[in-house]
Amino acid sequence: MTPLQLQILIHYAYSAEDYRQGDFSATAVREAIDLFKQPVFPAGDSFDAIFNMFNATPSIFCNLLEPSTADRQQAGMCYQLSARGRMYVEALLKVPLPMLAWKMPEQKAA
């Protein structure tokens, strides 16, 4: 997962606005949002289409965003985190930050 993708998910978890105020014109942003709103299992697709999608796209990133509810759309929001996206962000926030620790090199006993 790229830093941009992390930033987008965390933004939707804690902000009441769309990412970049709804300006998704940057290619990397558009690709990330398209990836996150992609369904895990596309309805009506054949087994081959689903198999090819999983080979091209890690399914863990699918269905993390969904279209906004009607009241949020009136406020100008296009997307919001899905339940799956909220759980994913919560799991990410539980990962401890790496800590620098100084250790003496291991020496073999003579």
Image (cartoon, grey):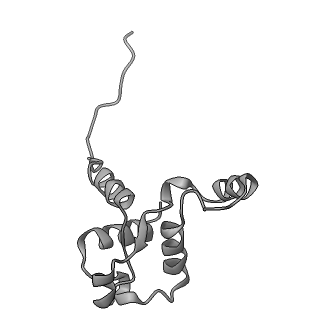
Give the vertical position of 55 relative to 10 (above or below).
above
Give the vertical position of 81 relative to 28 (above or below).
above
Left or right relative to 63: residue 6: left
Left or right relative to 12: residue 55: right
Q: Residue at x 39, y 16 (%)?
A: 108
Which residue extends farthest right?
48
Percent position of residue 106, x then y:
36, 25
How many marks are shown on the rendered structure?
A: 0
Give the vertical position of 97 relative to 30 (above or below).
above
Percent position of residue 48, x then y:
75, 54
Percent position of residue 22, x then y:
39, 88
Give the vertical position of 78 relative to 105 (above or below).
below
Q: Residue at x 55, y 54 (%)?
A: 59
* Image quadrant in which the C terminus is located: top left
Left or right relative to 63: residue 80: left
Q: Residue at x 70, y 52 (%)?
A: 51
In the image shown, does 31 or 16 lie closer to the viewer? Answer: 16
In the image shown, does 44 or 91 lie closer to the viewer? Answer: 44
In the image shown, does 40 or 7 lie closer to the viewer? Answer: 40
Which residue extends farthest top?
110
Percent position of residue 32, x then y:
50, 72
Q: Residue at x 31, y 73 (%)?
A: 11
Q: Quadrant of residue 44?
A: bottom right
